Amino acid sequence: MPVDISEIAPYNFSIVESQWQNFWLKNNSFHTDVNSSRKKYYVLEMFMYPSGKIHIGHVRNYTIGDIIARFKRARGFSVLHPVGWDAFGLPAENAALKQNGHPKDWTYQNIGIMKKQLISLGFSYDWEREFATCDEKYYGFQQKIFLALHKKGLVYRKKSEINWDPVDNCVLANEQVINGCGWRSGAPVEKRMLSQWFLKITYFVDELLGELDNLNGWPEKVKTMQRNWIGKSEGCSIHFKTNTGDEVTVFSTRPETIFGATFLAISPDHPLATKLAATNEKIKAFIDDFKKGSVAQGVLDKQEKRGINTEIVVDHPLLNKKLPIYIANFVLMNYGTGAVFATPAHDERDYEFAKKYELPMERVITSSENNDKLPYVGDGILINSGFLNGLSIAEAKKIVIQKLCEIGLGKRCEFFRLLDWGISRQRYWGCPIPMIHCDKCGIIPAEDLPVLLPYDVTFSKAGNPLENHGTWKYVKCPRCGNDAIRETDTLDTFFDSSWYFLRFCINDSDNENLLEKEDVSYWMQVDQYIGGVEHAILHLLYARFFAKALTECGFINVREPFDNLFTQGMVCNVTYQKENGDWLFPEEVRKKSHDEYEVIATGEKVIVGHLEKMSKSKKNVVDPDEIIKNYGADALRLFVVSDTPPDKDFPWSDEGLEGCWRFINRLWRLFVYAKSSGICAEECSESVQINALAPDIQKLYKDFHRTIKNVTDSLEERSMNKVAAYIRDGVNAVYLLLEKMESNKLVFSVVIRDLVKLFAPIAPHMCEEAWNMLGFKGLVGDSCWPSYKKEYLEISTVELPVQVNGKFRGIINVSVDDAEEVVLEQALHIPTVQKLMAGKSLKKKIFVKGKIVNFVV
């Protein structure tokens, strides 16, 4: 008779979870040291910014990492699973302005809040290794790194064209320019030449590109994004002689279109343009106007194409004709040589410009699929191109480069889209750049490291507070003793997050050498790195650069930091809007009918949107604290890895969360019932004798070995959604035989024990409590991962349902290798089948191997 255990009290997460969180913290349960006797495993989720509260996206990201860490620890690895805070940045300054506070206070207050939230989720961090990038010790050592890179020639200073916000008095990244205006001030952005510090990332460009092929544990889409960002191009530099005695050099990846060139376009910052502006007021006015916009290529591509004729012409290198030179707003000085030869028939930007200024267009590539529409940018055959006529694009490119080299007007070369990394920021809340400006000695390294940020600064809406802090800014030169000035720029926060994974390798918080080579060598590479695909380019590329640069400087000996990279999907939720466009919180809405919703307070019609990334502005966010309060951390952890593969976007649903809460209780009641039935650690002391078991118990035991294998394989593959599904199947199988638990204590003790182990990485609090309740020693996370026997995975027999006219009439047990006629003969001997078929003609026999037998009479 089936056993009903639904009356057993539910899982009391509010007591159990806080109890085990306190135990783990008090006993430093996840402390890690170098252990040469065990294989190491370093799992790391991307650094978190202390914005004030964690969101569901954080929960999913860090739950995935924690499941992997707990799984690997159970498999016998020495696991490093640290956590820290990417704590410098502009939001802290904005908050200081808004709240009349200080960025440091705001930051550390937020860290305290968010740390409590992380603890409440049961993450298995080694908290002894925790640090924030704004810790003086961290950024003090970072200054040593800066100076080492500077000494190695990988840091330099030069004038560069930047986006300048004239109201905030600061440099803006391209991404901070919105429709030509500063993202915060709204003021029109200006282009300026400003002295900036740069990291020479291009020094490693070939290695950064080439090593992507060897990163087998990275998603292909991420490697493709990095390849495109690095942007290797092969082409030709071509020299054009002007009628004024100057020379303009153009780099082109499309030299085969040279016969279609009808003009040259140079950047407003090109040396020739600067020279002409000194004596030509119209050109000067054009360049001044150009400098009012952004320097971002994406912005320039979209804006109206504008230019001015210089009245200078060049000789075409292969034809007896002259080409005019225009200064054009779509050509950037920091890409190539700041000059292009324009082929309007085969380039979108050239076409727009030529059409506006009524310049000629000469088609030099034809295709059977497109003979009329311009610009044509596809494949084809060369025409109107002299000795290139009839050649393919690839053949023509090769031959024209060879020709230009022969006549001394060209040179085969490579070009990369990747530029050196500008790291100067005109902000207070960042790592001070440890350099001194002296009129006598020049720009020299500071010697009084660390250069600490002053606390007593005054914040305003414009400018860098360090510029106005006299007692900090004005110093004596460490070489000559004369008056000098500190560098007031601070480092880009991407600098902070480009080496933090190395700092985690050092456990000794008092160690002045934050990159102890022996410890770094033990732990690096990061075996599993986890984070959003939005970091595919900048952070991941900069981190790869740092590994190479710090190896060159002798700090470490690993050139690629991350062995395996996992990019989790976003958490999405539906949106609700009034007809006037106002966003609504889910709790403000109720369902009126099958497909109609209304505002609870007013009865107004509500428009239900599609699943979108959770966003505060669209009010479709979910508060993790509320979920933990109502359902517990284990239910939330289970939910964010259930149903959807972790690399795909995850649709939030309250119903799904409820389902996970029910399953947590279903499993908890099973554990409690097992305890009351005498299932305990002592019962596992003997090995199971499989042949002595009844068929149904034998099947349960063998099937559970398959569950162990499926869960193990799925965790290795990072398929957490499959893990949850396999465990559900295993639990259901146990439930079907509850009435036989007391009479089969050994088998059920082993199954329940291993079920606790399998589920522990996902729901550690409940499983730790069950482990303890059932009398097992130590922590479940420290116990050995369940093993399975391969021979139990082999299916030698199978039970087949037998039907007559599509209705179930019995079951037969047959060998998986039995031939069809043998199976059908056995099925015909079932008494109920014989009775139904008596005196009737057999019309059809249906046999699906391993699945079913059906007789149609």
Image: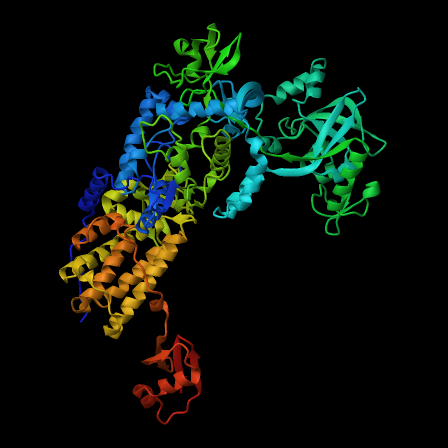
Q: Quadrant of residue 384?
A: top right
Q: Residue at x 81, y 22 (%)?
A: 243
Residue 465 visible in the shown view: yes
Front residue of this view, candidates 504 and 152? 152
In the rendered image, residue 701, in percent from the top left (x then y), is placed at 27, 67
Q: How many marks?
A: 0
Q: Where's residue 427, x and y in %? A: 44, 20
Q: Position of residue 483 (x, y in %)?
A: 47, 6
Residue placed furthest toward the right? 320
* Quadrant assignment for the C terminus: bottom left
Nearer the observer, 555 or 302:
555
Determine the residue located farthest toward the top in the rendered image: 482
**Among all residues in the image, which is located at the extreme bottom?**
839
Left or right of residue 749, residue 494 in this image:
right
Using the rendered view, name the quadrant where residue 120 is placed. top left
Q: Nearer the viewer, residue 54 or 789?
A: 789
Residue found at x 34% / y 16%: 455
Q: Is residue 188 visible?
A: no
Quadrant of image for the N terminus = bottom left
Q: How is the image coloured?
A: rainbow
Left/right placement of residue 108 relative to residue 823 reads: left
Q: Is residue 137 left or right of residue 194?
A: left
Residue 254 on image: x %, y %: 71, 38
799 in relation to 561, above or below: below
